[in-house]
Amino acid sequence: MISTPRWRTLAHALAWFATGVLAMVFVVYARGLVHDDPSPLTGAEMVILTGADESIGGQRQALVDQWNRAHPSTPARLENLSTSSDAQHSEMVSRAQSDNPGIDIYNLDVTWTAEFATAGYIRALDETTDIAGFLGAPLHTCQFDSRLWALPFNTDAGLLYFRTSVPTNALPKTLPPQPNDVRALRTSQPGLQGGLVTPLAQYEGLTVSALEAIWSAGGEVYDAENNLVVIDSTKARAGLRQLAQGLRGTDGLPPAIAPRSREFREDTGRTAFRRGEAPLMRDWPVAYGQLRSGDKPLKDFDVRPLPGRSVLGGQNLAVAAGTRDPQVAQELVRYLTSEDSERQLFAQGGLAATRSAVYDDPEVRRKRPYAPVLLQALNEAKSRPDTPHYALFSSVFQEIVVETLNSGGELPDDAVTRLTDALHGRLG
Amino acid sequence: MPDETDEPKGTLLFRVLFSTFLIVVATIAAFAYQKSGNNVYVLIGAMAGVILQPMVNNPEKTRKALGRLRGIVSGRQRMIAFGAAGVLVLTVAVVSIIEITPDEICPHATELRVLTSPEGLQAIREVTEAYARATADDGCPTVFPYVYAAGAASVGGALARGWVDSRTEHPLIDFGPRPDVWLPDSTVDVRKVREILAKTLPPELTANGRLVAPLRDVTSVASSPIVLAGPAAARDETATLPGLVEAVLARPRPTLAAADPESSAAGLLASAGYLQDERTGLVGDTEARRREQIIAGSTPSSTDEVSLLCSYLRRGQTPAAVLTSLRTWRRMVAGKPLGPGCPDRPASPPDADAAPPVLEGPALDLPFVRFTWSGTRHAEAADGLLTWLLSDNARPQLSQAGLDPPLPGCTPLERNACVPIALNEMLRVHLQAKLSGRVLLAVDSSGSMAARTGPGEATRFSVASQGVLESLGHLGPNDEFGLWTFPAQRGRRSPELVGLAPGTLPQRSAIAAGLRTARPAGATPLYATILGGLDEVAGGRDDKRIRALVVLTDGEDTSSDRTLKQMETEVRRRTGASGTRLYVIATGDARCEGAGGTENGLRLLTDAARGECLETSPGKADATMAQLFATLWGGR
């Protein structure tokens, strides 16, 4: 009965439990009221702060033009920054920290979500946001602390480019290639000077190449589950050692990695591959169109997914915390990441789509014949460490990799301490 | 486990009601979890509910318990306990509402955008990194400086405009973020910006060195004297800089290297060493011309002092005598990085003196410029950096980077002790004395030059054409100039668009008209154009002229069977006798380095012809070309 003491006690406990929970909901909303300024300003121009549009034919601007024709009362404008991701990051963070940012949407690199979310520079998207149809890995980079902070705009995964003179059975089983792989390559490529071109100059490309080498050996740099830096594990050390050894020829074989890769960025590496300095190259999908175009288009190459897991790249659109009209900003983000927009960005502009349906489109497959390979690579791609201080982490990681390569593959003793400090934003 | 057999039986209605109630509670909890984004809140709420429940449910029992407590603890202790509980509740509330940051993660630092000169980039990076460490609390920096570089000649207009776009310039794309701090090499750089501002403002606003927005204030934070260094320079501490230079120039077959006065503040200040006389002030026109000839003949590449010293480093040589800032010289001798385009870990030249004599004379004064556009947070960060730079804490860091403390009297914009009084006169003498040039420009007009530099932007060829037209503005009356495009335009057999001739008005008009009609199409006969162009420039009568072929290209040669090595040999052979220099502006897919060092890059060819290879993005090709031509017409 309802008056039974035991039942009554239980019912009261539950009632108070519910009251306490509701009180905390109120606290959370109160916090939101303190931090947010949701007063809409309909009619204001939506400003999207983004790196310079490198798509073929300026497809991002084309999408914004289409939006403006359909929404004349809430027009949008791209504010373009340098192509350098460091310069983009600095200006975006500075704007977010300024008294009057004047920005409604940030086009963030996939590694910056945690930083912008924890610093309060962006606002979480509504729970009602439809995320169906997005590829899992790019969508995952938009989430942090169980909330959705952005929608994926463009994605990226590394591909293995190879000259068609390399028989399929001579393609490497791992990256960097092992001595047996180099032996097989040399058989098909007489006069081989180096097997693979991959960017190893000291910039983000080095972070990408080194992470992939470590993953290829079964190692890891950061164990997110236990919040531990594990670069000193046997497998991670082996991955870095293979990278260092790959730069040197062994057993009378040419080096597995073209030694001048240590000076290469993506563009210079691409030139070396075009010149035939190495029959293999690790690069992003955008290189496909670049190699096939120009005065001297390269025809005798093809692509396949990397033998190991690739680093996931790309950009996500996030609504600025200081936007004057969050609803319109979110609507614009939805529009720019819609299936039609993604189809246009990929088919016309060469920017890898973030929605799976686009890869099944026959027209897209005709214009981007590498689409199935790219989709496979994207499905296997892996995110870089998720930390609010990614820029510092990456820069310290690069220093450590350079020291490791300079010492023939021996990891510095203080690598774990330095990387742990950097993950937490500390200068060691 | 409760004993189920003792449980009283409930009615069906009660069971339904209670089940519904349970579902409602679960829904509320799930909703709360979703809304909070953090189950810590839900946990706190639930615990509070459970703890409060018996107290409110059975107040009599609670009162009794409190009564028992009264007997045990004193009133004062109760006051303290309740006070502590109040503070605890308040703290939890404030932390919940405002922010919860895990202890081990540093809070986000203030981003501080620091623009500096290409020659000072490495040194300023090192110093500001030390500053970030100095601001750290438990390892967490409060300021994170982002340091990037651009020459004052390039960014002067953008700074004066408040870093907003003009018709032809897009500073955020071309140069980088809008700076909170500008740290150029010299006050003469700041004067350039003020002069641009003065053109648009009433004279009284900028009179007597007065600063106007967006310049907020200027403070010298370090210094570096201009020195004469190298094995041929005498070590006489009692001499003057012009005196030491005179001694070098008095030797048989003298050599003296210096950066270009029109492209580099250090180069301009260094000209005080060779355009001034120890006794009579400025040297006469004839002597100035002789000295300019010596410098032009012994300076391999001289847009600025970093590229000048790098060209020696790449060859493993030490300049016999060079006028340079002590900062850059010290860094070279110490094997420290000098800047982009230089080896990362340069080997120290074997016969370089680490401490050349420092004499009274011009010096870099590193003005720290703050802007009126900075918001509160960034202005405070800039103030903090300035305060630190002027403190004793920064001295060791400045010294390690190759810099000296600021010198007295070197902060004012006018009558600055680090800048020669006769600076404008020196520049006039330099412009009069510089050699006239015979320069042929070959612009790539292959199909890829039709590509746009950005969405809605001009094509690569249009940007290059704009650069050509801007370059014509630097032509002197005796300079000769011609224009080729390659491949040859449709209907023509030769790449010549306008033949070499003095830069008269009709010649300039012909060049402008030729560019308007040119249409990018076809392949890239780069090597054939270079060899043909070198032969063309080598002709002519006046052997005192500077002869140069400037090639702008966005791709690799697509029409020759020669290898780059074979081209190098051929270029060396053809330019050896004529002294013709080859300059390449590489944009798009074209590369100076190719990769590491000079091997397999176009720099191999420009080094063979004592010229320079400059890499630039397609959108900046016009500015790079204009800067190169300003140097070329300077006889460099």
Image (cartoon, coloured by chain):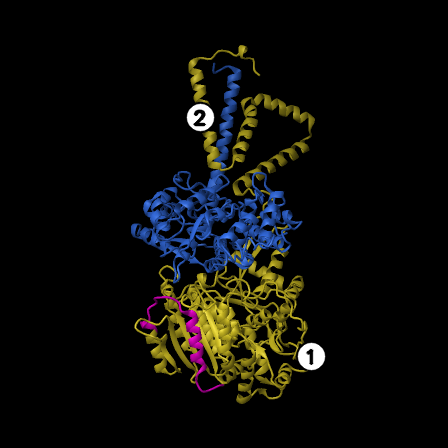
Chain of the residue on which disc 1 is drawn: B
Left of A74 or right of it: where is B362?
Answer: right
Magenta region includes residue B523: yes
At horizontal 60% and vertical 83% (from top left) the residue drawn is B254
Closest to the observer, B276 or B554: B554
Name the residue type under label 2.
Val
Provide the secondary structure element on which disc 1 rests: loop
- Kindly tell me whether residue A75 is visible in this rendering: no
**Is residue B457 visible to us here?**
yes
Return the x and y of residue A399 as percentages of the image width and height. Answer: 60, 54
- Chain A representation colour: blue
Q: What element carries label 2?
A: helix
Say the numbered circle drawn on residue B235: 1
Position above or below: B617 against A233 = below
Report the magenta residues as a range: B515-543
* Chain represented in yellow: B
- Percent x, y for residue B482? 39, 78
